[in-house]
Amino acid sequence: MTTLVLFTFAYLAVTIAIGLYAAKFVRNAKDYLVAGRNLPLYMNVATVFATWFGAETVLSVSAVFVQDGLGGVPADPFGATFCLIFVGLFFARAFYRLDLLTIGDFYRKRYGKGVEVLTSLAVTLSYLGWTSAQLTALGIVFNSLSQGAISLDQGILIGAVIVLIYTTMGGMWSVALTDLFQSVVIVLGLFYVAWLATGMAGGMETVLSHASQAGKFDILPKGGSKEWWAFVAAWATLAIGSIPQQDVFQRVTSAKNEKTAVRGTLIGAAAYFVLAFVPMYLAYSALLVNPEMVGGLLKQEGREVQLILPNLVLLHMPLFAQVMFFGALLSAILSTSSGALLAPTALFTENVMKPLFGQMQDKRFLLTLRVVLVFFTAGVLVFALNNTSTMYEMVQNAYKVTLVGAFVPLVCGIYWRRASTQGALVSSLVGLAVWAICERFFVESDIPPQMWGLFASAIGMVAASCAPQIVRDARQDAFEKT
């Protein structure tokens, strides 16, 4: 165990070194936020893939699959993959041509400062759950490696400090360079461990046949309208609710040109979809290798169920496999965590602070970004330490906010010329209000609260844009020329 811990911390040291090295490429805010829009295709693919391949994919989604099959994971990987496909086909070109630093800049150019601040706050708040899921996973890793000597909360704190160090210095360049290195480790590590687990479980055919007979490959829900609505809502929450997210936006717009932005997003989506099934396969293999351990974890409520894969590797695999697995796991978590911290930092600083406090010189803006990053990390840390949900639940809850408050203004802003500032304000406010009311009073309804919020947002946009305009339309000339 001591050897494994040493290897793990050596890997973390290498990751931090790469992230700090990236700081040499940061000369201004554009370098810090979108890597100067200079990433070639292979690096762009790696960053897009790393957008979603994080803690919940490896630890949480795999555990849900063992328990509920593919029907239990419509959000991830299916919703997450469709999100990247939709972005690549329908949004990447528009994002890139506008030459923006953040997704909040889009709302300002299309609808004005009021909508910019409102939607940016909604998107920023949504990152609490998403980023907390990554820090929780780091806590699980350190807790598992130390056999309990490091508590889950202590592990979360250690992980937050590590990610903060290199992200603060290098920004998107740190994210890009570490994503490239970590993506290679993820692929090699997971496939090697899957190969070993296959032998222990009696072969791939045995694993797949057992899963099939247990109904784990049944995707569509069984039941009435309530089950179908829950399935659609879970898929839509990630598939379209995460499109207005800053981390997706900054990975697309960091490409060196428009063609690379589109191709990188679509290739990254394909890579993610394929590799997301490897942890599921591993977790089901664990059920055959050690049914007592897996069964015991499945009976527990809360975050313990996410220990299936770490326990499999620690209990049944040789040291080299343990090094490869935890290296891959840390790679997945760190690559997602860094982007998840940088994204809301960029959005809050650029689209909430600047409109309220006025323009800043580039050096001051860069310093402000780093300071806000520290404060946001502290906020996420508090949220993670006080949350008992699984990572899969945290991720789904995070994107409900952007689904009801930011998605409709984004789509209509690009594809409907009549969409107005008044329409966007009503759409966002009504969507958030209806969702919040339904979450509080009608959570047992057949139609989930976020779907009511989405419907209200769409109706609000159309009705308020077509009605007499009390609020002056603030569309900028720069947007009209794109």
Image (cartoon, helix red, strand yellow):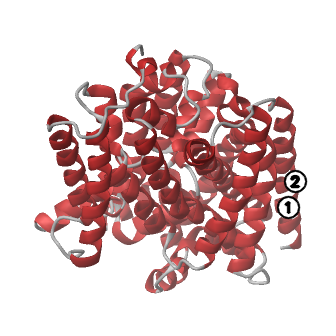
Q: Secondary structure at mark 2?
A: helix
Left or right for 422, reference 135: left
Q: Secondary structure at mark 1?
A: helix
Q: Quadrant of residue 315?
A: bottom right
Label at residue 40? none
Label at residue 13? 2
Residue, x 46% and y 65% (percent of image)?
Answer: 392
Tell me the crowding category of disc 1: few under 14, some 14 to 19, or many 20 or more residues within 10 angstroms, Cα based.
Answer: few
Q: Position of residue 285 (x, y in %)?
A: 51, 64
Q: Nearer the viewer, residue 398 or 115?
A: 115
Left or right for 371, reference 235: right
Left or right for 413, reference 96: left
Q: Position of residue 2 (x, y in %)?
A: 88, 72
Callout 1–callout 2 Cβ contact below 8 Å: yes
Residue at the disc numbered 1: 9
Residue 101 vertical placement versus 192 (above, below): above
Q: Nearer the viewer, residue 405 or 277?
A: 405
Q: Is residue 221 visible?
A: no
Residue, x 45% and y 60% (percent of image)?
Answer: 398
Label total for image: 2
Q: Quadrant of residue 475?
A: top left
Residue 61 vertical placement versus 107 (above, below): below
Left or right for 136, reference 399: right
Q: Is residue 422 visible?
A: yes
CA distance separating discs 1 and 2? 6 Å
Identify the image quadrant of the N terminus.
bottom right
Among all residues in the image, which is located at the extreme top?
481
Tag 1: amino acid: Phe
